[in-house]
Image (cartoon, rainbow, N blue to C red):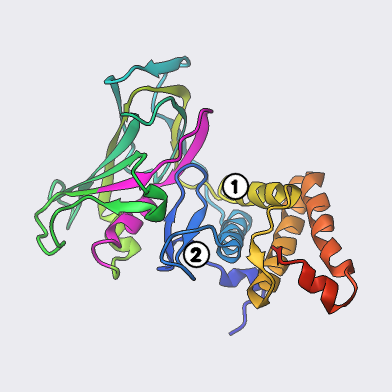
Amino acid sequence: MVAANPIEQFSNVAIRPRIKCLKPENGLPMSVQWSPIPYFYPVQILQFGFDYFMRNRTEQRELIERRLSNKDDLLTLKSGEKANFQIFSDLPILLFSAKIESMDGSSFVLFFEERIGGNLKRRKLNLEFRQWPNGSEKCVWNLNNFDGENEEENLHFAYFLEQNADFVEYLLDLPIFVLKALNLLNSKSTLSDALNFIPISIQFSGPLQLQLTSIRQKNFAHKEMPIPVERIFNKDEEENKLFLPAGWYSAMAQGHALSFLARAFNATGDERFLLAGERACDLFELKGNLELNKSKNFF
């Protein structure tokens, strides 16, 4: 059956096996569609954006949001200092704003406990976020020293962080981050397996700065999830970062991008998206195949 709305086919994009992980700094999917080294693949990024765009339009749920701290100031952690916050187990979206001042020791760690049949503390799972040597080549790391067959072992994984001198707005869909880690041990792991791991707490290690008002959880973030997609395509179009070689997959991405930019403009009224789409259409003003071939890369 053909979907009434063409973008309805882009559902649950984040859990697809060819998406290695979501980038912690912006929530964008990193693909292994055409390369074993994870990279930003425009087609999948746009499909990911369509997925949450449709959820935001169609799902009728009451938004629940809770803060993890009742303080309003800036928390500065020096090297070796740590701060812990308890996490609400029933809210899967975690948001906070932090500035990693040094990659030498700075990190944050998410702690989970497995729930099987209503019982907790069968296994613990840690997700550590920090810089790793050659980390961008793996996106998410398996730090376990066993083969995954021992079900009693605690689990330890790590996500790679880029060095950034500014505050970063983190938006973490916790079950998805757990799922992508579990896939390293068993490629057949499902979202249901990930949901068995209940978030307990998050620990920040300095040197870093943390906006205490920003630490909060939600039951969903359909409105926020497409924003990085809107930004990356507007930014990359403006800076002429045209990163797909000409071909059918590039044409597909071009069509997806124009559709997404149009929807972003309609939803926000922000003319930057309209202008970005208009500039992207300049490609089709080229005359003849010779000039088209000279345009080596586009969306």
Evaluate if marks 1 and 2 touch, with contact meaning CB atoms under 8 Å apart. no
Residue 269 visible within the image: no
Q: Where is residue 253 in the image (x, y as percent from the top left)?
A: 66, 67
Which quadrant of the figure has residue 258? bottom right
Return the residue nearer the eye: 230 or 80.
80
Q: Residue at 55% across / 49% down in the picture?
A: 225
Q: Is residue 131 visible?
A: yes
- Where's residue 170, x and y in %? 48, 38
Residue 162 lies, with reference to residue 165, above or below; the image says below
| Helix, strand or loop status at disc 2 | helix
The amino acid type found where label 1 is placed reads: Pro
Choose between 99 and 214: the one closer to the eye. 99
Q: Where is residue 160 shown, x and y percent of the image? A: 38, 45
Q: Which of 271 and 251 is in front in this view?
A: 251
| Left or right: residue 240 compared with residue 179 | right
Residue 166 magenta-drawn?
yes
Amino acid type at circle 2 is Val
Instruction: Name which residue lies at 34% across and 33% down.
Output: 107
- In the rendered view, would you say 173 is above or below 185? above
Q: Name the residue under label 1.
A: 228
- Residue range highlighted in magenta: 157-186
Q: Name the residue under label 2.
A: 13
As drawn, the label of residue 10 is: none
Q: How many labels does the image show?
A: 2
Residue furthest out toward the bottom: 1
Per the image, label 1 sits on a secondary structure element best described as helix
Q: x and y percent of residue 261 in the render?
A: 73, 56
Where is residue 104, by image quadrant?
top left
Q: Distance between the residues labelled 1 and 2?
A: 15 Å
State which quarter of the image contains the C terminus.
Answer: bottom right
